[in-house]
Each structure stands twice: as structure tokens, then as C-alpha cells.
Amino acid sequence: MTILELQKIANEVRKSIVTAVYSAKSGHPGGSLSAADLFTYLYFEEMNVDPKNPADPDRDRFVLSKGHTAPGYYSAMAHRGYFPVEDMATLRHVGSHLQGHPCMQHLPGVDMSSGSLGQGISAAVGMAVAGKLDGKSYHVYTLLGDGEIQEGQVWEAAMLAGHRKLDNLTVIVDNNGLQIDGRVADVCSPYPIDKKFEAFNFHVINVADGNDMEQLAAAFAEAKTVKGQPVAIVMKTMKGKGVSFMEDQASWHGSAPNDEQYAVAIADLEKVGEALCQK
């Protein structure tokens, strides 16, 4: 798939994120939007998955460790064909298979229920260990938030991954710089993130702009060359990316747009789509 095609899909993923959170009148748009390009790249380019056979034992695995950004995860899955895109409007509704955090019992294709911060990476490490023990070729990916890595359990998991030389594991950190209480650097600084993962024997790839599809492609291409170490991709992103009034605003970590704001958000994303169509 070309970079332009991926960019167009990512913009549609963002529209569905905004629509889902608006329809639910609750949810987490900021971190979903910052990771929309990553979700798109994983599901449309990187991972060996098949929506028609979501339980394939040889599929690649993905764990959304920062489970509150389920709207972004669901949106990529919907556009990839796991379920109808129209279902995004049922987010968080009673009886919907799209609850506020991913639940593997309700949605085929979700490899691990998540939401309690810090725990997803441990599950991903366990999957990677199992793959090694079983002689399987599948790869495990997990996405963490930069606020989430303040959790100590993250580093216990990282220590085991480095010790076991899990080169079938790629950890991605969405470094958008904001968490629910403000700037991560002010709340409890995790910096330098790259040096911390290096200390746990990871091969670290820094991505200057994780909302740039070409930079993501280069990072994952480099990751494929690494043997004998797990990989950590630390990507700088913009919280609320693509929606003018949400960008780089901590207040949009877990807030839903009202009618007027929803109209502005969709208009913003329509403009992005129009610009992409001119390329």
C-alpha cells in the first residue's frame, strides 16, 4: 500500500474516532487521534492479520496497553473489515461490542482485554515468550502511552523482555507529551524514554514525527532488521492530531465534543481529506 493510501485511510480512521466519541458522549479522543496513523500502519501494512480469520493461531498479535484509546483501535479494525464502520456510532452503548476499553470476549480480533494501565505490555511479553517456546513465527506488538509508562509494571515487563531477548516483540510508545492531568514532564517525567528502554536491552528507534506515515514506515523497516533484542519505537506525536481545537490540549484526553464541536472536527478532517485527494 502506498504512503498516500495509508494517509487517506488514517484520515478516515480519525473521522470514525470523532464520530464514535461524539455518539457515546464520552471517551478518549486525544490519544486515539495521536495514534491514528500508527493504528492504520499496523493494521493495513505491518501486521499479518486476516479479519475473516481473527483467531488464526499464526497471526501477529496486538495489545493496546493504553486501553482507553479504544476508539482509535476500533476504528482501524472497522476500516480493516473486522466489523461494519457504522458500528462505531454504538461506542460505549449498552449491549454494544464496542465498550470503553477493549474486551476480547466481545470483539473477535482483540487479542487481549486491556485498560488497567501498565498491564498490557506484560500480556504482550507473555505472548512473545509463548511464541518463542512454541516455535511460532508470529510477532507481538503493543502500544503504550507516555503517561502509562509511569507505571512500575511496565519496567518489570521490559526487564523480562530484554532478558529473554524477545526479538518477536515490538513496543511502541505514543509520546504525545500529555496525560489526563497535564504535561507528562510535569506530572512525573518519564524522560529520557529511549535511554530507559536501552537500559533494559531494547533496540530503540526514535521517530521524530509519529504522525508522518513515511517516518513510521522507516521505523518498522528498521525494526525488522533487529535480531536478538526486543524493539522499542518511541514516536513523538500530537495529541488530538487532525482536529484543530483538540491538538496539544490535555483537556481532550477524555472529553467528548458537543454538536458544534463535532461539526468543526469533521470539517477539519474533510479539509485534510480534500488536500490528500489533490496529491
Image (cartoon, rainbow, N blue to C red):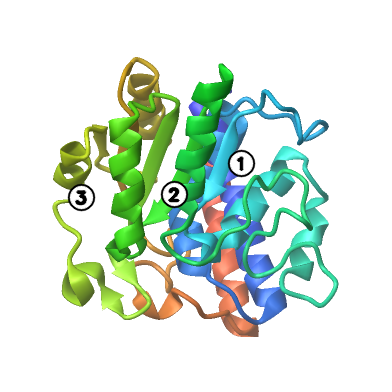
Which numbered dot is residue 223?
Answer: none
Asked if residue 201 can be seen in this view, the reply is yes
Q: Where is residue 228 in the image (x, y as percent from the top left)?
A: 31, 19
Going 33% across and 16% down the picture, which residue do you hit?
A: 227
Secondary structure at badge 2 equals: helix
Dot 2 and dot 1 residues touching (CB under 8 Å): no
Q: In this view, does 28 lie above or below 51?
A: below
Q: What residue type is labelled 2?
A: Ile
Task: Tell me the quarter of the image containing the N terminus.
Answer: top right
Q: Which of marks 2 and 1 is in front?
A: 2
Q: Nearer the viewer, mark 3 or mark 2?
A: 2
Which numbered dot is residue 9?
Answer: 1
Q: What residue type is labelled 3?
A: Ile
Q: Distance between the residues labelled 1 and 3?
A: 29 Å
Q: Where is residue 273 in the image (x, y as percent from the top left)?
A: 57, 48
Q: Distance between the residues labelled 2 and 1?
A: 27 Å
Q: Nearer the viewer, mark 1 or mark 3?
A: 3
Q: Which of 18 and 27 is in front in this view?
A: 27
Crowd band around label 1 with a 10 angstrom C-alpha radius: few (<14), some (14–19), many (20+): many
Dot 1 and dot 3 residues touching (CB under 8 Å): no
Q: Is residue 191 above or below residue 128?
A: below
Going 44% across and 65% down the picture, which residue do you hit?
A: 117
Secondary structure at badge 3 equals: helix
Going 43% across and 68% down the picture, which residue do you hit?
A: 244
Q: Is residue 82 above or below residue 21?
A: above
Q: Which amino acid does label 1 sit on?
A: Ile
Residue tagged 2? 121
Q: Nearer the viewer, residue 97 or 219?
A: 97
Q: Distance between the residues labelled 3 and 2?
A: 15 Å
Q: Is residue 30 left or right of residue 48?
A: left
Crowd band around label 3 with a 10 angstrom C-alpha radius: few (<14), some (14–19), many (20+): some
Residue tagged 3? 193
